[in-house]
Image (cartoon, rainbow, N blue to C red):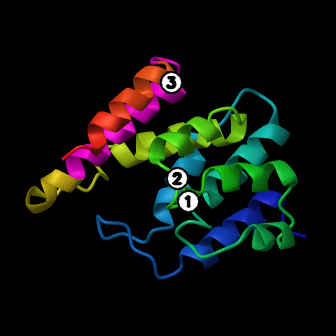
């Protein structure tokens, strides 16, 4: 029987099949990089769950999967909860989304790894013809990282996010 992590990887590959990341590589490469970047201490049980959340973090928002699909694949409640927290609903501001997920240790650790990967200059999409769209996104990544790593408080984070929304 496949391990929990193998089932999560299989589900993520299925979710992202045919998807492409802006640099032109298969989208699944991004969740794989995030999965490889996360670990917390020596607790292998917890690290397996963390890696499951990481590989699945975009499977609902970008891959068309549902929480039911994750449960049917045997994902534990804490993994499903963290993936749901990492799913940014269109009706929520980005700041509300990040503030909400911060209290969950799995979601927080994965979001930090996701932000670092998204802002990595080797992978970041920055298009000279679309700088007005790309620059605020990079500022959002930096401010969110600072908030999630407790380098700025919620009040300052929300102020920075409001400033970034202005044209």
Q: Look at the numbered disc 2 and give the secondary structure of its residue.
A: loop
Front-lying residue, 79 or 23: 79
Q: Which mark is residue 48?
A: none
Sequence-first disc among 2 and 3: 2
Q: Is residue 102 rendered to the left or right of residue 47?
A: left
Report x, y in % for residue 149. 52, 24
Which residue was labeled with disc 3?
154
Sequence-first disc among 3 and 1: 1
Report x, y in % for residue 156. 41, 21
Q: CA distance from mark 3 to mark 1?
A: 20 Å
Furthest-right residue in view? 1
Q: Contact (CB < 8 A) between labels 2 and 3?
A: no
Q: Contact (CB < 8 A) between labels 3 and 1?
A: no
Q: Quadrant of the N terminus?
A: bottom right
Which residue was labeled with disc 1?
89
Q: CA distance from mark 2 to mark 3?
A: 16 Å
Neighbor class of circle 2 (other Cα within 10 Å; few <14, some 14-19, many 20+) is: few
Does the rendering let one see residue 26?
Answer: yes
Q: Contact (CB < 8 A) between labels 2 and 1?
A: yes
* Residue at 47% from the left image edge and 48% from the top image edge: 93
Residue numbers of the magenta segment: 134-152
Which residue was labeled with disc 2?
92
Report x, y in % for residue 117. 42, 46
* Residue at 56% from the left image edge and 61% from the top image edge: 58
Neighbor class of circle 1 (other Cα within 10 Å; few <14, some 14-19, many 20+) is: few
């Amino acid at each position: 029987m496949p391990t929990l992590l193998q089932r999560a990887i299989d589900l993520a590959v299925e979710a992202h099949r045919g998807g492409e990341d802006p640099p032109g590589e298969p989208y699944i490469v991004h969740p794989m990089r995030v999965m490889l970047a996360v670990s917390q201490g020596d607790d292998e049980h917890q690290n397996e769950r963390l890696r499951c959340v990481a590989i699945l973090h975009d499977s609902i928002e970008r891959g068309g999967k549902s929480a039911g699909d994750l449960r049917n694949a045997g994902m534990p409640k804490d993994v499903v909860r963290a993936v749901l927290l990492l799913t940014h609903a269109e009706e929520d501001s980005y700041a509300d989304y990040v503030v909400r997920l911060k209290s969950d240790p799995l979601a927080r650790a994965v979001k930090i790894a996701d932000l670092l990967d998204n802002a990595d200059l080797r992978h970041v999409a920055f298009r000279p013809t679309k700088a007005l769209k790309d620059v605020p996104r990079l500022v959002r990544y930096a401010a969110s990282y600072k908030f999630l790593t407790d380098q700025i408080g919620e009040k300052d984070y929300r102020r920075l996010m409001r400033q970034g929304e202005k044209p």
